[in-house]
Image: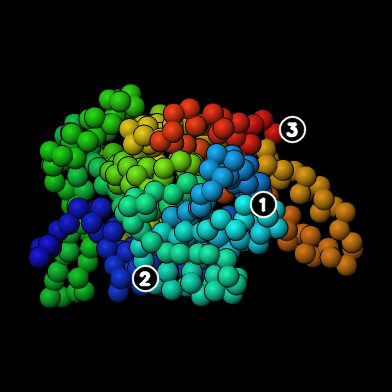
């Protein structure tokens, strides 16, 4: 049906989301310290506890604005379910006034991951959780908060390469031989007209130079063609509320720099990173950093209002991480091992060479004129004390 060549974006989609052979679709990939890679929630409860303070601020505004309505926290791409599992008891302890009208919604396209999420959350009792798609949410848009935590960097990307002064679309080809096992290799085609038009429209709007001046033949990068449609689907799912994107992103001058000649594409397996994304298809995660300006531009075009962004280290310090580190010094001697483990986990959250380089982006939207005023003072965007 597809022949022996497909665009890299198609290959990436299959490798991650095929329900039988995909790394996520089959449930083969594991997130956590004993899995294929770690995320902030998988290091312990501290990330969720700090984030919960920000979510409660926002939910207080929504609860006052909609005193009779159901409120929702939507986690898109919930992984192992760590974040929601950690947030539920924190919300139960801190949000008694409007807790009876709060629900958690999980948006998970991969059956294998969804099964594990349901097993994880089943033990938390009767807190209302449901699974559905963004398209289903758009039929009855929610009032609440949408979380996209390390999601957008795993959406399928187009891979571009510069040849003869022009950008071309990289393909993945199947090379067969009677003498050896079939191999996957890179190939390329001219840019199809719709992709060429999308690149021109978005780079013109974001004032991004692609390819950058000074790039030489063989220079390659990624194009996040899936982000703009995703932003529109997310916008349609929310009648009044916020979107928090936590992901790896670079400014366009760094993302599309001539010296970054092979883009940001990486694969992860068993806690090891590799640039060989064609190897072990279906057995490893594949990600690509986002371009900051193009992400914000795609969100604005979809109707989101951009509130601000910062690095994770800055966000968590503004939410009280330093106070948590200080409190660990007061733990009794017989809990020293646990205190040291917690300290290491907290420092990893803000380590600039690791999770500290994640960016936090806040967006909001409302169908009610002037309703955005309540979201202007976002705690994680304040200067740390």
Mark 2 and mark 3 in contact (Cβ < 8 Å)? no
Spatial distance from mark 2 to mark 1, Cα to Cα? 35 Å
In the rendered structure, the answer to whether residue 144 lies left or right of residue 16 reads: right
Identify the residue at image location x=55%, y=60%. 84
Mark 1 and mark 2 in contact (Cβ < 8 Å)? no
Image coordinates of residue 149 in percent, x first then y, are: 49, 51
Local packing at callout 2 (Cα closer than 10 Å; few below 14, some 14-19, many 20+) is some
Give the residue at mark 3: 385
Instruction: Tell me which numbered mark, 1 or 3, is placed earlier along the sequence.
Output: 1
Q: Secondary structure at mark 1?
A: loop
Q: Which image quadrant: the N terminus?
A: bottom left
Toward the front, the furthest residue is: 68
Give the residue at mark 1: 97
Identify the residue at image location x=47%, y=54%. 74
> How many numbered badges does the structure rendering display?
3
Image coordinates of residue 219 in percent, x first then y, are: 28, 39
Spatial distance from mark 1 to mark 3, Cα to Cα? 29 Å
Question: Which disc is residue 77 wearing?
Answer: none
Mark 3 and mark 1 in contact (Cβ < 8 Å)? no
Identify the residue at image location x=15%, y=75%. 179
In the rendered structure, the answer to whether residue 91 lies left or right of residue 65 reads: right
Local packing at callout 1 (Cα closer than 10 Å; few below 14, some 14-19, many 20+) is few
Give the residue at mark 2: 111
> Which of the colour schemes (rainbow, by chain, secondary structure, one colour) is used?
rainbow
Which quadrant of the figure has residue 16? bottom left
């Amino acid at each position: 049906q597809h022949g022996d060549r497909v665009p890299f974006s198609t290959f990436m989609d299959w490798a991650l989301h095929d329900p039988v052979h995909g790394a996520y679709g089959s449930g083969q990939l594991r997130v956590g310290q004993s899995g294929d890679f770690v995320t902030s929630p998988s290091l312990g409860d501290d990330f969720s506890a700090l984030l919960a303070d920000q979510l409660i601020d926002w939910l207080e505004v929504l609860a006052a604005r909609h005193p009779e309505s159901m409120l929702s926290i939507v986690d898109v791409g919930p992984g192992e379910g760590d974040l929601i599992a950690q947030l539920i008891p924190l919300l139960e302890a801190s949000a008694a006034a409007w807790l009876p009208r709060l629900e958690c919604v999980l948006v998970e396209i991969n059956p294998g991951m969804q099964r594990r999420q349901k097993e994880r959350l089943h033990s938390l009792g009767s807190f209302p959780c449901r699974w559905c798609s963004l398209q289903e949410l758009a039929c009855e848009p929610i009032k609440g908060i949408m979380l996209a935590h390390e999601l957008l960097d795993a959406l399928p990307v187009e891979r571009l390469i510069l040849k003869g002064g022009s950008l071309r679309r990289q393909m993945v080809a199947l090379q067969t031989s009677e003498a050896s096992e079939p191999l996957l290799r890179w190939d390329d085609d001219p840019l199809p007209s719709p992709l060429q038009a999308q690149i021109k429209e978005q780079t013109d709007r974001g004032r991004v130079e692609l390819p950058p001046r000074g790039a030489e033949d063989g220079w390659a990068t990624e194009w996040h063609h899936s982000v703009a449609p995703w932003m529109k689907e997310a916008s349609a799912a929310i009648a009044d509320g916020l979107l928090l994107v936590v992901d790896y992103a670079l400014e366009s001058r760094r993302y599309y720099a001539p010296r970054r000649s092979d883009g940001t594409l990486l694969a992860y397996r068993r806690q090891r990173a590799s640039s060989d994304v064609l190897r072990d298809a279906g057995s490893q995660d594949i990600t690509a950093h986002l371009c900051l300006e193009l992400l914000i531009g795609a969100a604005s075009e979809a109707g989101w209002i951009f509130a601000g962004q910062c690095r994770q280290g800055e966000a968590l310090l503004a939410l009280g991480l330093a106070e948590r580190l200080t409190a660990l010094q007061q733990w009794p001697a017989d809990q020293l091992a646990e205190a040291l483990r917690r300290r290491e986990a907290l420092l990893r959250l803000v380590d600039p060479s690791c999770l500290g380089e994640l960016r936090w982006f806040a967006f909001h939207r409302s169908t009610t004129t002037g309703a955005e005023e309540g979201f202007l003072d976002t705690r994680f965007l304040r200067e740390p004390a």
